[in-house]
Amino acid sequence: MRVSILTATSAWGGAENHAVNLARVLKQRGHEVAIVELGHAVYDDHVDPSTGIEVIHVELPKLLEKLTFSESLNLLKGLASDVVVFEKGELDTANWRFDFAARMCFKRYISIEQLICAAMPPRVSRSHLSGLLPGFGLWWYRTYCNRFARSLGPHSIVCVSEAVRSRLVNDYGFSPHKTITIHNGIQMSKFRPDPEVRAAARCAWGIQSEDLVLGALGRLAPIKGYDVAVRAFKELKSSMRDRRLWLVLVGDGPSRQSLEQLVKENGLEDSVKFPGSTERAWEIYPGFDVFLMPSLLEGLPHALLEAMAAGCPPIANGVGGVPEVITSPNMGWLVGEGDPEGFLLAMRQAADCSTDKLVEMGRRAREKVVFHFDAKALFGHLADLIEFGTVGQGSVTNGQVYKAVGRGR
């Protein structure tokens, strides 16, 4: 069977990593696999040609969201695939016309929703002609219908967390019979506590072994909320002058310059480090004592799973599927959405913890990921869906059905 994995991205991140891991699993099962880049090219440096996974770059005649049904049909029919999987960063990526064209072209069309969609706003109507003519709230119906229509084209819709799925089903009327949850998973053999890796990371950063490191790894973009972490770190440093504290932000992206400026304005140049991006994340996490995730929007973040697997207790905003991972205070701190004071409080509590307590929390964090977010099991279920059109009567985690939602159809 030939499978094409469609992506529409301009930068490397969790969804792109998910696409590559899925391609590897399908290739190992004996399928022909191609990753099809719609627009931007980002995969060449991340896919080893020796794996036999093909990378195809497709130039778009216009923005993906503006494609007509005919244009979408012409673009897709050239792929000559049996099954197409669309790795979507957002629900609104492409449009419903693209979905229907994909359904017509292929034996099976599956979309993967990586981020939680915005909630449906309250229905309000504007008035016209100085209030003489009431509005009908057509914008609200247009928003709802456009998003509801995204449920009709795919044969199955995979959500990476129950939060993502619930938003689609409850706010936008997606069918619970073909909208299922298969959590993101990671490779446990790569991400684990390692004293030697910890020492090497800290040596590279010029940080002593006994210092407390609060760290983050990801794309430096506004949606990740790292400015909150920087401001909270400033307050933490001011109140704990007797501790050697460090903030390490690993990654690159459009916010790097503004974050560096914020660090400079707050006089933190000597205690905040920007090591840059890395292709070897498993060599970074052991260097952290606490992992920070002040994100404004997530689906089920790979970085959170990776850090916890490496034994880092997390401090994370409770957005998207994050509460499905941090399910107990004995493994980390779950902060309410839009609560910078709460994030600072969690950082204070972490800094007050003994080394032994942080290690024990990290052990429990790893245990959670090992038992519930193993890539081998979860990508296996996703591959089953691609091959057979079903993974059983429900959404899947840790190799077992945990919530009856029916079969895709």
Image (cartoon, grey):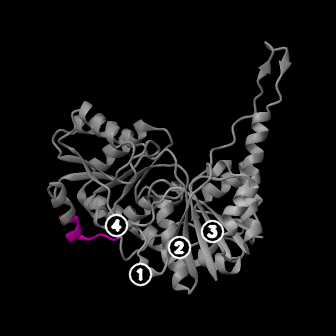
Q: Which residue: 77% across, 40% down?
A: 142
Sequence order check: which comes first, mark 3 or mark 4? 3
Using the image, determine if residue 308 lies above or below residue 218.
below
Which type of secondary structure does the marked residue at label 1 adopt? helix
| Farthest residue, direction bottom | 30
Q: In the rendering, at what x and y percent does residue 263 appear? A: 27, 37
Which residues, given as a range, are shown in magenta? 192-199
Residue positioned 52% across, 66% down in the render: 184
Which of disc 2 and disc 4 is earlier in sequence?
A: 2
**Residue 400 image label:** none
Mark 2 and mark 3 in contact (Cβ < 8 Å)?
Answer: yes
Q: Looking at the image, is mark 3 or mark 1 nearer the viewer?
A: 1
Instruction: Pick the residue in front: 20 or 353.
Output: 20
Residue type, mark 3 in image: Val
The quadrant where residue 218 appears: bottom left
Give the distance between the C-alpha atoms of the residues marked 3 and 1, in whole angstroms. 22 Å
- Residue 110 lies in quadrant: bottom right
Mark 2 or mark 1, whichever is nearer to me:
1
Counting other residues with Cα less than 10 Å from the Cα at mark 1, is it few (<14), some (14-19), or many (20 or more)? few
Residue holding disc 1: 50
Mark 4 lies on residue: 310
Secondary structure state at the residue bearing disc 4: loop
